[in-house]
Image (spheres, rainbow, N blue to C red):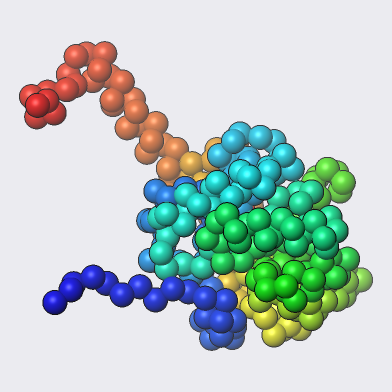
Amino acid sequence: MSTQKIIKKVTIDTIKKMKNKTPIVMITAYDALFAKLFDEIVDIILVGDSLNMSFCGKEDTLSATLDMMIYHTNAVANGAKKALIVLDMPFGYYTCKKDALKNAIKVYKKSKADAIKIEGGAERAHIIKYLTKNSIAVMGHIGLMPQSVRSEGGYKIKGKDEENIKSLIQDAKAIEEAGAFALVIEGVKPTAAEEITKAVSIPTIGIGAGVKTDGQVLVWSDMLGFFEDFKPKFVKRYLNGAKLVKDAIKDYAKEVRERKFPTSEYVY
Ligand code: KIV
């Protein structure tokens, strides 16, 4: 008898059905090694364009390319068999509906991404609609949108006043109507995120948006404490990864320098 475990793949439908029932757990991953560690525990793995910062050491996400995102999504798919895999469309690859579809088709042809994520509110709804009508699964992303960091002159928290909350709700509804299956809400005041979540029937996944969204997402290298350049207020470090790694490397370097490694245990 085969002892192989049957893996039940998370689908778009699984995620949609979780609204108002089970909080959705999403995390980023950029490679097979970490994707494999996260896969059984989380619902969604996002191959975020945040990799341009934490993986590539760039100042923002804007120079990420589609080929980079496809390369990392393929690495993640080699490690993750269960979680839904979402590829973050990089800046400049969905400025009009024709380009967006051409690039989304490239993603589906060249990777095992289950869906793509697109930043933008009501102004991008026509693009999302065009994609969903052409069999592309889309996750929206509103509030603080990292790809707008230069045009907005920084990372700006949203949902601070009634007018902005109203406009965020309009964004969320437009994205829902366009056919997106879920929506990331980033850097938004908790009361605003709660109102948005109540206003739509698709699940919302918050990051820096309080506890009242349908799920949460964090960037893996932030929450495991590997990325030390800066720590946004919303990041809880569940591990001091940088210290653990540095301590281990120091031990290794010391043993090499003192000719204590390798001992007989580690030779053929
Ligand atoms: O790129 C990313 O990691 C993201 C998350 C912050 C949601 O878009």
For the view shown, which residue lies furthest in the right direction?
163
Residue toward you, 101 or 11: 101
**Above or below for 255 versus 182:** above
Q: In this view, does 241 lie to the left or right of 206?
A: left
Where does the C terminus fall, quadrant-wise?
Answer: top left
Residue 80: where, in percent of width, then height?
A: 42, 60
Residue 190: where, in percent of width, then height?
A: 70, 69
Q: In which quarter of the image is residue 188?
A: bottom right
Q: Which residue is drawn at 34% across and 25% down?
A: 250
Residue 16: where, in percent of width, then height?
A: 59, 81
Residue 248: where, in percent of width, then height?
A: 32, 32
Residue 102 in view:
yes
Q: Which residue is drawn at 61% across and 48% down?
A: 69
Q: Which residue is drawn at 71% across and 55% down?
A: 103
Q: Which residue is drawn at 42% across and 50% down?
A: 32
Where does the N terminus fall, quadrant-wise?
Answer: bottom left
Q: Quadrant of residue 150?
A: top right
Q: Is residue 52 left or right of residue 73?
A: right
Residue toward you, 65 or 167: 65
Residue 46 in view:
no
Q: Quadrant of residue 166?
A: bottom right
